[in-house]
Image: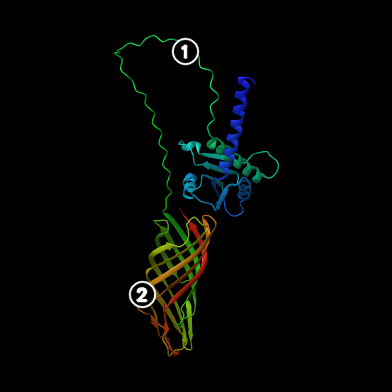
């Protein structure tokens, strides 16, 4: 075998070894897959393709923010995010100093028959696999050296030289770009039709909306502002007439999220202080009794809890429970009844409504 044939055989063997080690290394990578939400047909295809390659896959619902920051936060070496249109996928690989070379936008192939979701998922996985092969491939071993040429005599060097001696310098390695940070400040608004009950107070149930908003200044801690108003008043009937009772309260307090904010299911609790007023309107049905109207103010310390599910971000479903005590205690005296009606001792609010994430 000639020297040239031996060299080609060595290079071919090294290429096979490099390809095998690269595929094995890519199979150990952790991949974050961000779904487009409920009804996304692309994410299941992505999961099948990645698992078949032996990769560790984490699937999360739709998340906003920089794809690189989300991937690093989950300790993933690569991340894929399905667009809300379900026709494109963003692919990111954590390697190399150039931020532009880390992310790639893969679009749905046009004009191809068959399942478009499967075709898009396959194209994205092939792009990810190809980039991992380029990144993880080990350097080629050097080829056998050529025979050294015969040494030729060199002219003698001068003993002294007036030329300055230059020293070789290694070029500075470019610093990696800092990881972008996501804004933790988030706002959510909610509207919850509710039922107002007063256990032990002698008052029937009333109805009205619970309207408010919460904001988070850290990952899980923030505040809330709420307003509870009566639209359907509580009506007390007596032999001499009837009394309609309504009111409103505005409160502000602290709020804590109990679950990971990146999950589609959220649960939180809070407490605060509010101020409100009670309005009563009495109508007499006999000439011997005179109806009176009036307004009573009160302070309302409260506790509040909510459970929400962001089924179609930023829109979600929400269930609320709030309880508080009115101080000083409003008492309503009604002629013809053996006991007085006591307001807000305590007042319990239950409701189900909608929530919208602003940012």
Instruction: Give the camera-side residue of 119 and 344.
Output: 119
* Residue 7 visible from this viewpoint: yes
The image shows residue 273 at horizontal and vertical percentages of 36, 69
- Give SS at disc 1: loop
Report helix, strand or loop for mark 2. Answer: strand
Name the quadrant containing residue 111.
top right
Pick whichever, 86 or 175, lies toward us. Answer: 175
Q: Which residue is mark 1?
A: 151
Q: Which mark is residue 297?
A: 2
Residue in the image at 49% along x and 58% along y: 356
Q: Is residue 74 left or right of residue 113?
A: left
- Residue 102 placement (x, y as % from top left): 50, 39
Disc 2 or 1, which lies upstream in sequence?
1
Q: Is residue 232 visible?
A: no
The image quadrant of residue 227 is bottom left
Question: Could you tell me which residue is drawn at 68 percent across and 45 percent down?
Answer: 115
Callout in the foreground (2, 1): 1
Label disc, if present, on residue 199 of the rendered structure: none
How would you rate the neighbour count of disc 2 (Cα within 10 Å): few for under 14, some for 14-19, many for 20 or more?
A: some
């Amino acid at each position: 075998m000639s020297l040239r044939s031996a060299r080609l055989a060595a290079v071919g063997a090294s290429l096979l070894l490099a390809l095998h080690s690269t595929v094995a290394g890519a199979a150990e990578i952790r991949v974050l897959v961000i779904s487009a939400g409920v009804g996304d047909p692309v994410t299941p295809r992505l999961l099948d393709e990645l698992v078949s390659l032996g990769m560790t896959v984490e699937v999360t619902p739709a998340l906003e923010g920089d794809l690189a920051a989300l991937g690093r936060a989950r300790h993933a070496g690569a991340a894929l995010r399905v667009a809300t249109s379900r026709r494109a996928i963003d692919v990111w690989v954590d390697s190399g100093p150039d931020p532009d070379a880390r992310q790639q936008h893969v679009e749905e192939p046009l004009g191809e028959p068959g399942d478009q979701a499967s075709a898009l998922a396959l194209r994205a996985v092939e792009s990810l696999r190809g980039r991992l092969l380029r990144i993880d491939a080990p350097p080629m071993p050097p080829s056998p050296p050529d025979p050294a040429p015969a040494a030729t005599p060199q002219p003698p060097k001068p003993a002294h030289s007036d030329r300055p001696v230059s020293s070789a310098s290694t070029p500075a390695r470019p610093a990696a770009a800092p990881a972008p940070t996501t804004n933790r400040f988030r706002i959510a608004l909610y509207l919850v039709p509710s039922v107002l009950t007063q256990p032990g107070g002698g008052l029937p149930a009333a109805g009205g909306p619970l309207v408010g908003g919460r904001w988070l200044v850290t990952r899980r801690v923030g505040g809330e502002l709420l307003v509870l108003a009566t639209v359907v008043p509580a009506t007390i009937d007596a032999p001499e007439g009837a009394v309609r009772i309504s009111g409103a309260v505005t409160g502000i307090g602290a709020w804590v999220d109990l679950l990971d904010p990146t999950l589609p299911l959220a649960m939180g609790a809070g407490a605060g202080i509010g101020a409100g007023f009670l309005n009563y309107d009495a109508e007499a049905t006999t000439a011997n009794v005179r109806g009176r109207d009036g307004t009573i103010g009160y302070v309302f310390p409260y506790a509040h809890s909510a459970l929400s599910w962001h089924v179609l971000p930023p829109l979600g479903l929400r269930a609320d429970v709030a309880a508080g005590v009115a101080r000083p205690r409003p008492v309503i005296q009604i002629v013809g009844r053996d006991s007085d009606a006591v307001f807000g001792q305590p007042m319990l609010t239950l409701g189900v409504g909608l929530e919208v994430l602003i940012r």
